[in-house]
Image (cartoon, grey):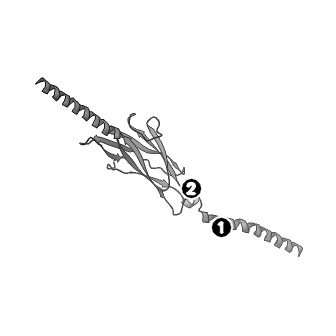
Amino acid sequence: MQKTHCFLRQVMAFALIFAAISHAHAVSNGVQTNLPIQQHFITEADGMVQTEPSATYELAAMQPSNPMPKGSQDGIYQFTLTGIDTTLSLPLWFDHAGTYGYTLRPISVFPADSSPDQHCYQIYVSVQNGPDGALSIQMIAQHSQEAKSNTILFAHHLHGNPAALSPQTGDFAPMLLWWICLPLSVGFLFLHRRRSTTL
């Protein structure tokens, strides 16, 4: 009887150790999510901008222990997106179950006379242990009174004539022609005046 109880205790101990090892393995694998960030510049006139507009953003952790992208410092990660329409998938890696909160906002926009999107997104990532021990993940984002979503969009306003901000390659042709014609016109007027004086 004592041998039976001893055997059962050994079996239960082995089962607990195996369960702990399996859970640790699932946790060590972790899970990754990508924050889908979209940038759009709304232009007020037609034309192409040779020097593309850009915006710099700041991702901040609500808790100091929250996982952050590589290159972060003190729970803050800054990055720049360039282009009128740009999309970025920002990876975040989690190896423990829990709920993680972040804020994301633009901190500067180029050209300087542009109007930046003033929204500050609140992002929540929920990481849960599944029945098989694997981690599952869900991300939601929200700003102001907008409905919760899994997409993040910043819409900035680009003022003025985009072509005037940075001329297109073809715009140099009239300027070059004007510089060529100017000396010829001055020379013609000088010769005409000199001829008139002689007569």
Q: CA distance from mark 2 to mark 1?
A: 20 Å
Secondary-structure class at tag 1: helix
Name the N-terminal-most of marks 2 and 1.
2
Q: Which residue is mark 1?
A: 174
Callout 2, which amino acid? Thr
Q: In the image, is 184 to the left or to the right of 106?
A: right
Say which quadrant the N terminus sits in. Answer: top left
- Find out whether the residues at labels 2 and 1 contact each other: C-beta distance under 8 Å: no
Q: Residue furthest bottom?
A: 199
Judging by the rendered image, the residue that carries numbered circle 2 is 51
Where is residue 134? Give x, y as percent: 29, 42
In this view, 174 is above or below 5: below
- Quarter of the image where one finds residue 198: bottom right
Rendered view: 183 above or below 17? below
Picture quadrant where residue 95 is located: top left
Image coordinates for residue 116, horizontal then vertical, percent? 47, 49
Q: Residue at x 65, y 67 (%)?
A: 174
Q: Residue furthest top?
A: 2
Label 2: few (<14), some (14–19) or many (≥20) C-alpha neighbours in 10 Å: some
Q: Nearer the viewer, residue 97 or 195?
A: 97
Name the amino acid type tagged 1.
Answer: Pro
